[in-house]
Image (cartoon, rainbow, N blue to C red):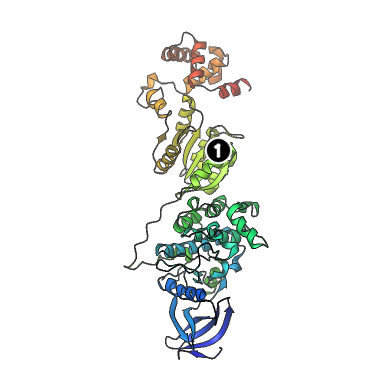
Amino acid sequence: MIGRKLRKRYEIREHLGDGSTATVYKAFDERLGRDVAIKMLLPHVRETTRKRFFQEATAAAQLNHPNIMAIYDIDEDNGRNFLVVEYVEGVSLAYYVPSAPEVVIDLGVQIARALQYAHEREIIHRDIKPANIHVTPDGRVKIMDLGLALPREAKRVTAHGMVIGTPAYISPEQAQGLDLDHRTDIYSLGIVLYEIATGQLPFNADDITALLLQHVKQAPPPPRLIVSDLPMALENAILKALEKNPTRRFQSCAAFATAMQAALPQGRVHKTSAQEQVKSEGDTPGAETPLNAPETVPSNRVRPRPTPQRTYRVILADDHTLLRRSLSSMLEMRDEYIVVAEAADGESALEQTVSILPDVLILDLNMPVRGGLDILPDVRAQAPQVKVLILTGRDEDALIMRALRAGAHGYLLKSAEESELIDAINRVTEGQLVLGKGVAEKVVGGMLAPNTPESERLDETDQRILLHIAAGLSNDAIAQQLDIPQMTVIERLARIMDLLNAGDRHNAALIALRSGYILLEDLHALTTR
């Protein structure tokens, strides 16, 4: 074919490769003066293959996106059908296996946005894999080969129950021959990004039947078992895309892209190594970077693209692993949240919060090393933009008051319903103070109430006096410990007894313990010094 001219227009110059149904050449379009790729159907292929060949033309002709290979024409020469498509320079996505997290996110976001564009036009690709995705020298992704793409007008070419696609990358529903929707591409993209992030596939077997069964039944190994420093938020995003049940995956590629971007520490944008090389050599002025490339404006024939929903980045800090996993699973089922880190102790929670700067820190009070109340002042000082939602089983007034005074944006009990927790997260991100059921009643109706006169409240000095009384100290000893006059201790104690309706100082301390104004752990810490 080299040197031949098709339709007196396309001069074949180079053989690019062969597939099972077509041969691809590089050609020169003499009419428009540009390089193109010619995809020529092999002779004697089955009729279903021929139909898919024309189906590719139908699908690709509806798409005009910078990250999707363009189709220019469909024609025939001497009885052989061929497609004229965009000639794409660059390397296969397989070249980037493995890559750093920033590269994974950069490439993944581009692919997801392109698929979102196709899905909005009701076209699913059905064969997302590295071989069908190229990266140009300036770092731009190009999705290639829409041979299995299914446009909305197309009649089904394959029989129901027939497995079609590349086994290593197909979704569980593809593996079972079920009807497909756009979420099959989300799963396949998850496989691709898992491979780029870790250097290996999540499922692998020599026997195709075993491989298909793994897609349907077996959970993928967490990527961080392979790459320990992979951001947890990126791992969570990939694993969510790989959910067996499509309803538990991201429900759109736009949501997947947003979650991946949220996995990057704030302010960090990374270009692929190919693009960095071009930039260093001097790029064309005004060239666009992939992550900041403007969206293609849809034509009047298609509905406009919806405004992407913001994704909130959440850190979960609780020493109960089962609770963290339950909360993480519940949040990850919603596209608007991504869990970027988890911590089982206060010190780790503080380090991760300061390092990652999430939107919300969901913080338990009782944790090893340092508790939630211990780290709260440090969180507010070192990461003031992070909203802190206390989620605890403790409803003592003293804890509530301390948490709110230390700068917590919300206080919720672990007995709260799922809807209450979701509402609380949303409200604290908007800057509102959130008090859960059982907490709000205490604040509004008890001695913590903002509208309670100062003369009727127990302040911190009152609580410290009561704590020392519970520890068995005399008024004189309390005065020395707190460095206040003994007469002040006596005057305050008289007011405290009146407020608590206590008969004596020891009864006042007992009431304070029962009411939560002072805490047993504080008493234990005081008596064990």
Q: Amino acid type of disc 1?
A: Leu
Q: Residue furthest top?
A: 503
Quadrant of image for the N terminus:
bottom right
Q: Label 1 crowding class (10 Å Cα cut-off): few <14, some 14-19, many 20+?
A: some
Q: Is residue 6 above or below residue 144?
A: below
Name which residue lies at 42% across and 37% down.
Answer: 420
Residue 75 location (% of width, % of height)? 44, 83
Residue 358 location (% of width, % of height)? 49, 47
Q: Residue furthest right?
A: 206
Q: Nearer the viewer, residue 461 or 76?
A: 76
Task: Report the residue marked by disc 1.
Answer: 323
Residue 393 location (% of width, % of height)? 51, 30
Q: Is residue 412 visible?
A: yes
Name which residue lies at 55% across and 57% down.
Answer: 172
Which element is circle 1 on? helix
Q: Nearer the viewer, residue 184 or 353?
A: 184
Q: Is residue 68 above or below residue 100?
A: below
